[in-house]
Image (cartoon, grey):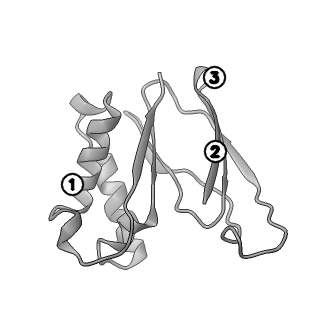
Amino acid sequence: ALFAYCEPARRKIVLAGAGHSPPLIIGERRTEYVETSLSAPLGMLACWEAPSVELAPEPGETVLLYTDGLLHRTGDPMDRAFARLHAAAASVPKGIRDDPGAIVDHVLHTVLPDGLDSVDSDEDVVLLAARFE
């Protein structure tokens, strides 16, 4: 799980992770994973607490959230799957960087060029892109 509190007008996001893959920030000057503190997955401990991290996306940047099913469906080891996702996000054409839906389509088709049905898997794949002005 990933818990997020967002104040769009202030371009502020507070994140706390519970075993979820780190979000990606995609922009003109950077494409990078958000460093989140590691904690036990939700439900593993009777009393769960996770440190939070605050980020402030720059105007024009997009925060990309995704399920680990996207990584698993690549068939690659996790380090290569993360590298593949990063490369896909970094290669988003400038002409579509203002359209979160187009960013998601580009990333999905770049990471899984043969489509979701090319691998027999029960892994869910969800991507969510939020652009900040």
Dot 2 lies on which element?
A: strand
Residue shown at 22% from the left, 37% from the top: 93
Q: Which residue is mark 3?
A: 10
Dot 3 lies on which element?
A: helix
Quadrant where the N terminus is found in the figure: bottom right
Q: In the displayed structure, would residue 16 be above or below residue 84?
A: above
Tell me if mark 3 has few (under 14), some (14-19) or many (20+) residues whose alpha carbon lies within 10 angstroms of its own: few
Tell me if mark 2 has few (under 14), some (14-19) or many (20+) residues whose alpha carbon lies within 10 angstroms of its own: few
For badge 2, the amino acid type reads Ala
In the rendering, at what x and y percent does residue 38 appear?
A: 67, 66
Question: Residue most toward the left?
Answer: 114
Tell me if mark 1 has few (under 14), some (14-19) or many (20+) residues whose alpha carbon lies within 10 angstroms of its own: some
The answer to which image quadrant residue 97 occupies is: top left
Q: CA distance from mark 1 to mark 3?
A: 32 Å
Dot 1 lies on which element?
A: helix
Q: Which residue is mark 1?
A: 109
Residue shown at 58% from the left, 26% from the top: 8
Q: CA distance from mark 1 to mark 2?
A: 26 Å
In the rendering, at what x and y percent does residue 24 appear?
A: 46, 49
In the rendering, at what x and y percent does residue 6 appear?
A: 62, 34
Residue shown at 56% from the left, 63% from the top: 20
Q: Which labelled disc corresponds to residue 81?
A: none
The answer to which image quadrant residue 114 occupies is: bottom left
Q: In the displayed structure, would residue 113 be above or below residue 132?
A: below
In the rendering, at what x and y percent does residue 95 appear?
A: 22, 29
Which of the marked residues, 3 or 2, is nearer the chain's N terminus?
A: 2
For badge 3, the amino acid type reads Arg
Q: Which residue is mark 2?
A: 4
The answer to which image quadrant residue 82 occupies is: bottom left
Which of the marked residues, 1 or 3, is nearer the chain's N terminus?
A: 3
Which of the marked residues, 1 or 2, is nearer the chain's N terminus?
A: 2
